[in-house]
Image (spheres, rainbow, N blue to C red):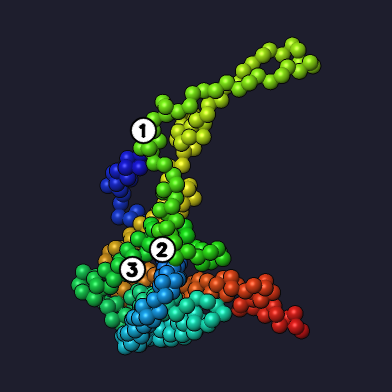
Amino acid sequence: IKYSMVYLIWFLFLFCKNHGFDKLANITRFLSFFWLCAQSLLVIELSFQLNDYIASNNSGGILVLASGLFAAAGIWGCTVLYDSYAGCEEGWWFVNTTVVMSVLAMGLSVVDSVGVGLLPGTVLFAYSVFMCWYALLSATSLECNPTADKSELDSHQKSRAFWMVMGVTGVCMGFMIYTGSKIITILTGEEVTSVGDVVAQKEAAAAAQPGMDEILTSDVSDKTPLKVQPKAEPDEDAADATPDTTQTDSNSACCCAGLATSKPSEMNLGEPKEETVFFHFLMLILIMYCTMTLTSWGRTDGAPEAVGSSVEPDQSLYIKISVQWLTFGFFFLACKVSYNAGCEDESDQCLFCWEGDEEEA
C-alpha cells in the first residue's frame, strides 16, 4: 500500500503546474522549522550520551581531546563568521549573540552542581556557530553573505555548503533511527542512558523475546498432554446443575500459546506503536526539510538571494536563526533537568529561579 501511494503521488505530480510546486516549496520552508528543532535535540542528546559513555569508561583523556576538537571547530567557525559574514548590522548581532550564549553555555556545563560535563557545552558551541553560518547563507546582503549574488549552480562555495549541511543532517538522521523517541529524555527528567546502555537494552530485549521463526517452528508434540481437573464436590444447593469437566492445557504458558487465536496487531513483533509514529513523523518532516535544501532555502527559480524580492530569503534567515535560539533554550532546559536530578532535597531544585530567596525573605 505504501509503495502504491508513492507511485500514485509521483504520477499526480506529472500533472501539477509550476505554481503548485512553488506553493509546496514555500510550505516546506516553514515545516522545515520542526525538523531543525528535532535536529537540535538530536545533537544535544548525542553529546550528553557520548559524554556519559566516555566518562563511564574512565577515559578522561579522550573526553578532553573530543571537547578540545569541538571547541577548536567552534573558534575556527567564529573567525570565519567575523571575517566574511558579520559585515552588516544583522550579521554582527547574530555572530556576537552566538559567541556570548556559547560562552555562557560552556561555563554552565562545567559547573559541578549542574553535572552536564565538558563535552556537551563544546558540542553546542560548534553547532551554534554552524547554525549561525547556516542562517546567514540566506542573507541578501553581500556583507553578510559573500555568495548572495551567485546561484548554487555557479558557486562552488554554495555546493560545498550544501554537502556540509546534508552531512550534519545525515549524522542526526542515523542517530534518530538508532535511538527513536529517547531523544527527548534530556527535557523530561527521565534517566538518560548512554550509547552502551542502549545497545545492552536492545540486545537483552531481543534475547528475551522469541523470534517468529522460533515460534512457528517450535515442536510441542512431545509436551505434556491435556489433563483433566478433578470435578468439584457437588453443592447441595446446586443439585440441578449439570456436571462439567474443565480441561486446561498445561502448555498454555509456552511461547506459542494463544498464537492461533491472537490477531496480528496483538503480537509484539517490533517497536511500540508510539515509536513507529514518532519515527514516521520525523521522517515526514525530514523529507520536507530535504525538499527545502534542494532550493538552497531560496527561490524555486534558482535565483540568488540578492536578486529580486527579499521575502523568501528573509523568511529562511529568521526561521534558521530562531532555531539556533531555541537550541540554546533546549540546552539550558537540559541543564536544569540535570541539576534538579542531582538534588536530594526537592526544595533545592530551583535552577534559574529564586524560590529559595523568596522563602528566606
- How far apart are the alpha carbons under marks 3 and 1? 44 Å
User: Residue 47 or 79: which is nearer the viewer?
Assistant: 47
Report the quarter where the C terminus lies.
bottom right
Label 2 sits on residue: 196
Determine which quarter of the picture holds residue 95.
bottom left
Residue 169: x and y, percent?
34, 65
Question: First in sequence: mark 3 or mark 1?
Answer: 3
Under mark 3, the amino acid is Val
Label 1 sits on residue: 217
Question: First in sequence: mark 2 or mark 3?
Answer: 3
Determine which quarter of the picture holds residue 125.
bottom left
Label 3 sits on residue: 168
User: Residue 57 or 222: which is nearer the viewer?
Assistant: 222
Residue drawn at the location 29% of the way across and 71% of the way down? 164
Under mark 2, the amino acid is Gly
Question: First in sequence: mark 1 or mark 2?
Answer: 2
Q: Are marks 2 and 3 in contact (CB under 8 Å)?
A: no
